[in-house]
Image (cartoon, helix red, strand yellow):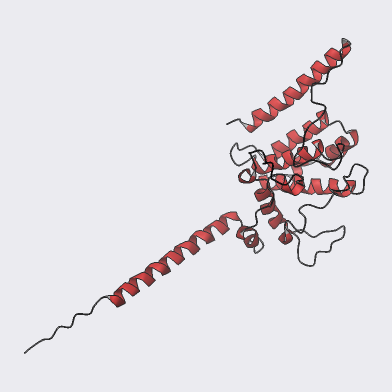
């Protein structure tokens, strides 16, 4: 397996090398394009070629990295967010976007102290960006900027009686579980979609067409985490097996013939 830290460093070096080669050849009078001019997007495809695409794919990559960084390679969430910030600062072409993200992430060390903090920090930051760009000319009219996740995707993520206006009250414990399921490694689609699959997949479909909802999300609402929920499932299964075993035992005992013994004096 490729180490995540090495991958990030290699990717950064590759982009720097291509940028350096392009500048070098341009100075020699040769115009080159080290990156392809046109990319075919699937989940991040917009209604027009200039909508969504690369920025959408970056957000998807960033969320996937923050969710999975600590699962196998034990890279801290803070380190991943710091690398993301440096990538945006040095390689993202949108100057305004770069300035906003750099300012938003200036205090990362004091705001992120755990893996869960990193996941929620990026989620909050993404929603801030969506709120700022809602109605902007860069917004795809067929894929409007919303506060993610939508109510259809995760109704439990929003607190009861939360209004539908600008200020949404989130149940962040449920949101955290949703993000881990939605961007988790077990929910990533590796195979290329078939020709019969739906051609227009939205942001919510980047890793799965339908996000998985299971009982863990509902248990989180009453203060239980994933480990607690798993222990509850194991305990419930053990009790169910014990009840079944007792039932079978007593049924067999009732069916056993009773031998009568007559004692003669």
Rendered residue at 87%/60% (across/down): 165
Quadrant where the image shows the N terminus? top right
The percent coordinates of residue 163 (x first, y second) are: 84, 64
In depth, the one of 151 and 71 nearer the eye is: 151
- Is the residue 93 above or below the residue 182 in the image? above
- Is the residue 255 above or below the residue 93 in the image? below
The percent coordinates of residue 55 (x first, y second) are: 81, 38
- Residue 238 quadrant: bottom left
In depth, the one of 52 and 24 nearer the eye is: 52
Outermost bottom residue: 265
- Is the residue 171 above or below the residue 123 in the image? below
The percent coordinates of residue 246 (x first, y second) are: 37, 70
In depth, the one of 220 and 259 nearer the eye is: 259
Q: How many marks?
A: 0
| In the displayed structure image, the side of residue 122 where residue 142 appears, left or right | right
- Residue 112 quadrant: top right
- Is the residue 101 above or below the residue 225 in the image? above
- Residue 136 quadrant: top right
Quadrant where the image shows the C terminus? bottom left
Rendered residue at 30%/77% (across/down): 254
Outermost front residue: 196
Outermost top residue: 28
């Amino acid at each position: 397996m490729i180490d995540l830290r090495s991958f990030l460093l290699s990717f950064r070096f590759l982009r720097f090398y291509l940028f350096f080669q392009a500048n070098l050849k341009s100075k020699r009078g040769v115009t080159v394009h080290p990156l392809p001019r046109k990319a075919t997007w699937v989940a991040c495809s917009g209604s027009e070629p200039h909508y969504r695409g690369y920025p959408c794919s970056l957000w998807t990559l960033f969320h996937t990295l923050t969710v999975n960084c600590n699962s196998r390679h034990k890279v801290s969430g803070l380190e991943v967010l710091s690398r993301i910030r440096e990538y945006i600062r040095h390689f993202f072409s949108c100057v305004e976007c770069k300035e906003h993200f750099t300012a938003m992430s200036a205090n990362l060390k004091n705001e992120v102290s755990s893996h869960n903090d990193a996941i929620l920090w990026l989620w909050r930051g993404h929603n801030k960006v969506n709120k700022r760009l809602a109605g902007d000319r860069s917004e795809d009219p067929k894929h409007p900027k919303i506060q993610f996740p939508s109510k259809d995707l995760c109704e439990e993520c929003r607190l009861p009686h939360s209004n539908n206006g600008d200020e949404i009250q989130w149940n962040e414990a449920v949101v955290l579980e949703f993000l881990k399921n939605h961007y988790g490694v077990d929910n990533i689609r590796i195979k290329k979609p078939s020709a019969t699959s739906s051609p227009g997949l939205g942001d919510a479909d980047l890793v799965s067409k339908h996000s998985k909802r299971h009982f863990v999300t509902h248990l989180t609402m009453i203060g239980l985490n994933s480990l607690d929920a798993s222990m509850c499932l194991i305990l419930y299964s053990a009790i169910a097996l014990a009840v079944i075993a007792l039932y079978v035992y007593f049924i067999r005992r009732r069916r056993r013939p009773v031998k009568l013994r007559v004692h003669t004096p």
